[in-house]
Image (cartoon, helix red, strand yellow):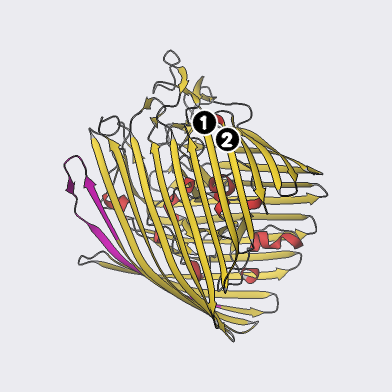
């Protein structure tokens, strides 16, 4: 059995909630052994989205398909994107890694804060995978906001939200409209990265995006019970631009999604409880009737749905003892349709049930929290899988230091798309096995006035980890890696003085295929982020920098991305409820980088390669956005 280690920390006395998190329903993060970072949406700049906020968190790495509004996913501590559970007000959008969430579909301004659980997520969040959790939380304070943005690549954005008392409860509504041409200039290397004769500069084609989102919430009290109704909808239409050397104008992708939930919660003495019913529907269409990508003409419609329920109870008879338990179950269904022939593929479905119970005991400065989580997976055939996931958390409060440690097991079954999906450039694999991992962390936190530091080391050992491997024709197929080992260290520092705040994070990750002896692709060995916010009266200037290095593109470790350093800055003027902000990304307009032809040969000559991410998709150069906001 391999147990992993990790260190965690962050926060000065007024900022301790940044490390520990704010109160989640049925939990008390102020005494948790887990590591959670909370980022407030109000601290973000104009071009910031959920993805860029997550990129500032120690241990997190973001992959982007392109510019503003384009597909973006997050990994935590070397995990795969599907191993990270993403939740909206505690409702899972991808329970047990049922899909990789596109963060571009989640408008940051619709939420009050983003909570990133890198370890020790409470039972109420239902996390069973190895990648932790990202919980997007809508606010409760009365407020209204209207923001309009415009900028590079024909980008426009409008956001409106309002929250306040409503009858015997309160209400919240937010809508966000994004439109961009995405036709930024980039270096096309013709698919021959080490030959300059066919390199040329040109616009990104078929990279436009239009997206409309709506989030709404109603809360009401009837005696001791509080009722909450939540809905979140999405309409998205975009081009599919293809690889940098094989653009695909005319290919379209559309998505429609709705998530609705009804929750009841209350308190009775030492008992806090909640019950929830929820369901989501999603339809995705890929139109490639010209056969520009993949293998021949395609026009597909994938439909997926899930209905489920959950319940939890927290019993705290004293400050030294508490019991937290949660149950959940859901039914998933997926079916593909070929719109060229108007035929439906065979439907696929499964039933998943989870249970968790955690005991927290405190004795002096020491807190211990043993827990057991279980998953039962029934795919409707003769086989069914039941897995028990024991975990243990420890914490020692030795002010100004806090020591933490966790260890335990994780499990994720392959999702229905990994098994059966077909989107021309990605192919499912019905022979995939579930992922199983042993992981843990140990950490130290230092918190003194105006200064906070977190340092962390982590590791996880996995069997049958699922990864996507691209062949010579550019088609990616899901495959199992029999044995994988990931380890690393992370650091976060916050310094605050009068009119000045500095935040920085850095992560070093080593992820290996233990059988092949090679590094796992798409996981940067080194990543760092830093931001300084300087305020003078109504003005604020916020320069930032990000670094990623040592990222391999293939399992054979033949192609490695060169180090990538990007600078940005934001300037804001605020007067009363009004603010005007100019935010610039990639300040130096970097669109190409220099890298050795053979990364394993120190004497290899250099070649010019386009700035790219996410399996060969180019990233934009200098990007600016001007935002005017009225907030009350």
Residue 284 percent across, percent down from the top left: 33, 47
Image position of 351 with respect to 454: above or below: below
Left or right: 412, with 341 as reference point: right
Left or right: 293, with 338 as reference point: right
Instruction: Name the residue tied to disc 2.
Output: 150
Residue 363 percent across, percent down from the top left: 66, 80
Residue at 59% over, 26% down: 589
Residue at 24% over, 37% down: 298
Around disc 1, counting alpha carbons within 10 Å, would you say few (fewer than 14), some (14 to 19), or many (20 or more)? Answer: few
Task: Give the residues in magenta.
Answer: 333-359
- Identify the image quadrant of residue 410: bottom left
| One can see residue 460 in this view | yes
Query: What is the secondary structure assignment of the residue under circle 2?
Result: strand
Image position of 305 with respect to 28: above or below: above
**Which image quarter holds the C terminus?**
bottom right
- Identify the image quadrant of residue 627: top right
Residue 9 percent across, percent down from the top left: 66, 58
Q: Disc 2 versus disc 1: distance between alpha carbons?
A: 8 Å
Q: Give me the disc on residue 154.
A: 1
- Identify the image quadrant of residue 192: top left
Q: Give me the disc on residue 584.
A: none
Around disc 2, counting alpha carbons within 10 Å, would you say few (fewer than 14), some (14 to 19), or many (20 or more)? Answer: some
Residue at 58% over, 81% down: 322
Residue 99 percent across, percent down from the top left: 38, 53
Left or right: 120, with 283 as reference point: right
**Which image quarter holds the N terminus?**
bottom left
Query: What is the secondary structure assignment of the residue under circle 1?
Result: helix
| Pick the front one: 195 or 161 | 161
The answer to whether residue 355 is magenta is: yes
Check whether the beta carbons of the residues at disc 2 and disc 1 lie within 8 A of each other: no
- For the image, the number of numbered tags is 2
């Amino acid at each position: 059995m391999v147990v992993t280690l990790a260190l965690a920390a962050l926060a000065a006395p007024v900022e301790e909630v940044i490390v520990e998190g704010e109160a989640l329903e049925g939990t008390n993060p102020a005494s948790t052994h887990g590591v959670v970072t909370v980022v407030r949406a109000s601290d973000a700049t104009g071009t910031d989205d959920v993805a860029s906020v997550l990129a500032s968190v120690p241990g997190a790495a973001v992959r982007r398909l392109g510019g503003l509004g384009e597909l973006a996913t997050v990994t935590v501590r070397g995990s795969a994107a599907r191993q990270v559970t993403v939740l909206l007000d505690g409702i899972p959008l991808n329970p047990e890694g049922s899909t990789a969430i596109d963060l571009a579909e989640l408008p940051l301004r619709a939420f009050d804060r983003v909570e990133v659980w890198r370890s020790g997520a409470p039972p109420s969040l239902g996390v069973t995978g190895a990648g932790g959790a990202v919980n997007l939380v809508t606010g409760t304070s009365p407020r209204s906001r209207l923001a309009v943005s415009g900028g590079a690549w024909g980008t426009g954005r409008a956001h409106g939200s309002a929250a306040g008392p409503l009858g015997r409860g309160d209400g919240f509504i937010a809508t966000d409209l994004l439109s961009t041409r995405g036709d930024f200039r980039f270096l096309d290397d013709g698919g021959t990265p080490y030959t300059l004769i066919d390199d040329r500069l040109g616009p990104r084609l078929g990279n436009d995006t239009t997206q409309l989102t709506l989030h709404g919430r109603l809360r009401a009290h009837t005696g001791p019970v509080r009722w909450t109704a939540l809905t979140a909808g999405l309409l998205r239409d975009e081009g599919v631009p293809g690889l940098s050397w094989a653009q695909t104008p005319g290919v379209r992708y559309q998505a429609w999604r709705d998530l609705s939930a009804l929750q009841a919660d209350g308190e009775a003495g030492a008992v806090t409880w909640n019950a929830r019913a929820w369901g989501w529907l999603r339809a995705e269409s890929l139109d490639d009737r010209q056969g520009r990508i993949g293998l021949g003409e395609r026009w597909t419609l994938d439909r997926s749905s899930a209905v489920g329920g959950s319940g939890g109870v927290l019993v705290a008879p004293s400050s030294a003892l508490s019991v937290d338990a949660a149950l959940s179950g859901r039914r998933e269904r997926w079916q593909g349709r070929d719109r060229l022939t108007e035929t439906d593929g065979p439907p696929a479905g499964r039933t998943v049930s989870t249970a968790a119970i955690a005991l927290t005991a405190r004795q002096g400065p020491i807190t211990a929290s043993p827990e057991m989580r279980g998953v039962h997976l029934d795919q409707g055939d003769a086989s069914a899988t039941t897995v028990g996931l024991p975990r243990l958390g420890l914490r020692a409060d030795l002010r100004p230091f806090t020591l933490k440690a966790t260890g335990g097991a994780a499990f994720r079954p392959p999702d229905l798309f990994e098994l059966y999906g077909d989107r021309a450039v990605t192919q499912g694999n019905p022979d995939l096995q579930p992922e199983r991992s042993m992981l843990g962390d140990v950490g130290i936190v230092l918190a003194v006035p105006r200064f906070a530091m977190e340092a962390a080391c982590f590791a996880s050992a996995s069997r049958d980890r699922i990864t996507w491997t691209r062949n010579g024709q550019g088609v990616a197929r899901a495959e199992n890696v029999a044995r994988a080992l990931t380890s690393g260290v992370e650091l976060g520092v916050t310094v605050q003085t009068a009119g000045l705040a500095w935040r920085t994070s850095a992560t070093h990750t080593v992820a290996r295929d233990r059988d092949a002896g090679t590094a796992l692709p798409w996981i940067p060995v080194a990543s760092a982020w830093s931001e300084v916010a300087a305020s003078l009266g109504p003005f604020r200037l916020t320069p930032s920098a990000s670094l990623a290095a040592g990222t391999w593109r293939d399992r054979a470790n033949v192609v490695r991305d060169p180090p990538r350093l990007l600078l940005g800055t934001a300037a804001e003027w605020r007067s009363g409820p009004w603010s005007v902000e100019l935010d610039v990304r990639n300040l130096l307009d970097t669109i190409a980088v220099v890298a050795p032809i053979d990364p394993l040969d120190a004497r290899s000559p250099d070649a010019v390669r386009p700035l790219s991410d996410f399996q060969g998709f180019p990233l934009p150069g200098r990007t600016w956005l001007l935002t005017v906001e009225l907030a009350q």
